[in-house]
């Protein structure tokens, strides 16, 4: 079921410029990738399978925003090693 995709056609569609050496490298990689899609297409009836968005059960950890005092501008600008300014 794997349809041959021309590297030249793909390059034209993506507006990329590749060398003949890069083309020789990319062609087998693309074929291998398409083969994996063919394997996935062979899996029977997945209509009852729930989508998996994250397989590691990690959760995002957030912290509430806290207001903190800002740095004093003059104190910061006195450090001429890092800043040059006209006061």
Image (spheres, rainbow, N blue to C red):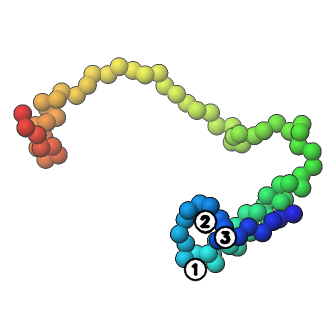
Q: Is label 1 or label 3 in front?
A: 3
Q: Which tag, 1 or 3, sits closer to the chain's start?
A: 3
- CA distance for labels 1 and 3: 12 Å
Contact check, label 1 and label 3, Cβ < 8 Å: no
- In this rendering, which labeled residue sits more in front, label 2 or label 1? 2
Residue at image point 58% right, 75% down: 22
Measured as percent of width and height from the top left, residue 6 is found at 71, 70
Residue 39: image tag: none
Q: Pointer 2: residues within 10 angstroms few (<14), some, or many (20+)?
A: few
Between the C-alphas of marks 3 and 2, the distance is 8 Å
Can you identify the residue that label 2 sits on? 12
User: Earlier along the polypeptide chain: callout 2 or callout 1?
Assistant: 2
Quadrant of the rendering where the N terminus is positioned: bottom right
Q: Is residue 1 above or below residue 58?
A: below
In-image side of 45 versus 11 (left or right): right
Q: Which residue corresponds to the image point at 7% horizontal and 38% vertical from the top-left? A: 86
Helix or strand or loop: what does disc 2 sit on?
helix
Vertical order, 55 against 10 (above or below): above
Q: Which mark is residue 7?
A: 3
- Residue sticking out furthest to the top: 67
> Which quadrant holds residue 67?
top left
| Picture quadrant where residue 83 is located | top left
Residue 80, by quadrant, is top left
| Viewer-side label of 3, 2 | 2
Earlier in the chain: of badge 3 and badge 2, it is: 3
Q: What residue is rendered at 58% in x and 79% in y?
A: 20
Residue 82 versus residue 59 in the image, above or below? below
* Number of other residues with Cα within 10 Å of mark 3, as a class: few under 14, some 14 to 19, many 20 or more: some
- Which residue, given by chain and number where applicable, does mark 1 sit on? 21
Residue 4 placement (x, y as % from top left): 78, 69
Q: How many numbered circles are shown? A: 3
């Amino acid at each position: 079921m794997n349809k041959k995709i021309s590297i030249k056609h793909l390059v034209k569609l993506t507006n990329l410029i590749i060398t003949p050496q890069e083309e020789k490298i990319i062609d087998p990689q693309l074929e291998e990738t398409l083969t994996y899609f063919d394997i996935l297409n062979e899996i029977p009836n997945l209509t009852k399978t729930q989508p998996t968005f994250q397989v590691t059960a990690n959760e995002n950890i957030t912290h509430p925003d806290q207001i903190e005092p800002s740095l004093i501008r003059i104190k910061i600008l006195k450090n001429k090693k890092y800043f040059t300014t006209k006061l």
